[in-house]
Amino acid sequence: MKVVVEATPVLPRPSGVGLYVINLLAALAALQKTEDFHLGLAYQPSLRNWLRGNLTLPEVLRRYPNPAVLPLPVRLLNLLVQLPGHGPILASLEDRFDRPDLYHGTNYTVFPCRHSQRLITIYDLCFLRYPQYVTAVSRGYRQQVHRGLARSDLVLTISESSKRDIVEYLGVDPDRIWVTPLASRYASDALGPGIVPPEPAYLGEEPLGERPYILFVSTLEPRKNLLTLIEAFNQLKSQHRIDHQLVLVGQRGWQVEPILAAIAASPWQEHIHHLDYLSDAQVAYA
């Protein structure tokens, strides 16, 4: 039995879905020792890298033998499958997977393999439930997800709440949906041999933890409700005189300007720290 996992969400500085895929690949690779199947991975470059002619894999994926690297980014492939006469091109691309028994699309879409059972992961439906908090590109995910569902035999999601949303908003039969809750990223050696030891993070020259702190870890963007977090922190400092700092760990996302403005306008701005992206070892320390 051959299983191919879509690894496109893995970026050089992985977070979110990328970490999910990295740990999934590591766990499946370990299972090959006791289960009778072969693991493969498929990868498509980002549109930016494709335009630059860069089809190389992120370093963390190079430990897996014989990856299938497709010469088209996801965005162009999604356009291609809507055009008449695309069958021969898709067949040529599918040959790179060597006709797997199971193909797992890990990020709201799945390649339309003709000879495989197809599985799709849908993490949440924030773009449908809260369209005011997502980009115009994200609001267009509905059609992409519907196309993925039409190609899929089974749906994975990460919570019972998301399963209920998939049933309500997308009309999927609940019997087609399996919930697989997320595990700690440190439960496997996905990023290398052994568990990653903690590595100190710093606020300037001061090690994180010298004083008590409130920690936020995620991309900075409107749907994360950071404006409310900053307002709550201001009230805690002003009304309750807490000694804590607010530490924001995460890369800058879309429409980050109001968040940065709220930090700058805070009377406690010197106690609010944005550390951008941290390594796994530093997040473990935090």
Image (cartoon, rainbow, N blue to C red):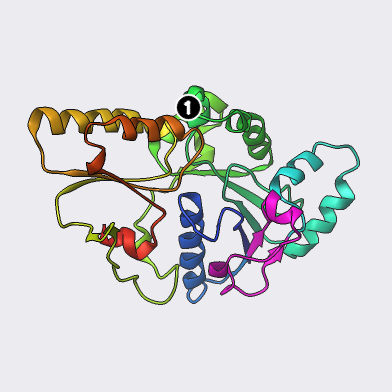
Q: Residues within 10 Å of mark 1 (few under 14, many from 20)?
A: some
Callout 1: SS: helix
Q: Quadrant of the N terminus?
A: bottom right
Against 72, is 214 above or below? above
Residue furthest left as drawn: 240
Residue at image coords 46%, 49%: 16
Q: Quadrant of residue 76?
A: top right
x then y, percent, for residue 134: 52, 30
* Residue identified by numbered label 1: 133
Given residues 50 and 204, the one toward you in this image is 204
Q: Is residue 5 left or right of residue 248?
A: right
- Write the residue at 27% across / 31% down: 266
Identity, as a three-letter code, of the amino acid under mark 1: Tyr
Q: For the C terminus, give its image quadrant.
A: bottom left
The answer, for residue 148, to whether it is visible in the render is yes
Q: Quadrant of residue 147?
A: top right
Horizontal and vertical percent position of residue 31: 48, 70
Residue 115 visible in the picture = no
From this view, report whether residue 83 is shown above or below residue 25: above
Frontmost residue, 7 versus 223: 223
Q: In this figure, what is the number of numbered marks?
A: 1
Give left or right: position of 119 versus 253: right
Based on the picture, tell me whether residue 239 belongs to the magenta stretch: no
Which is nearer the eye, 58 or 111? 58
- Magenta residues span 41-69
Q: Position of residue 33 (x, y in %)?
A: 49, 77
Picture coordinates of residue 254, whole percent (x, y): 51, 36
Look at the picture and state if 112 lies above or below 233: below
Q: Is residue 205 left or right of residue 250?
A: left
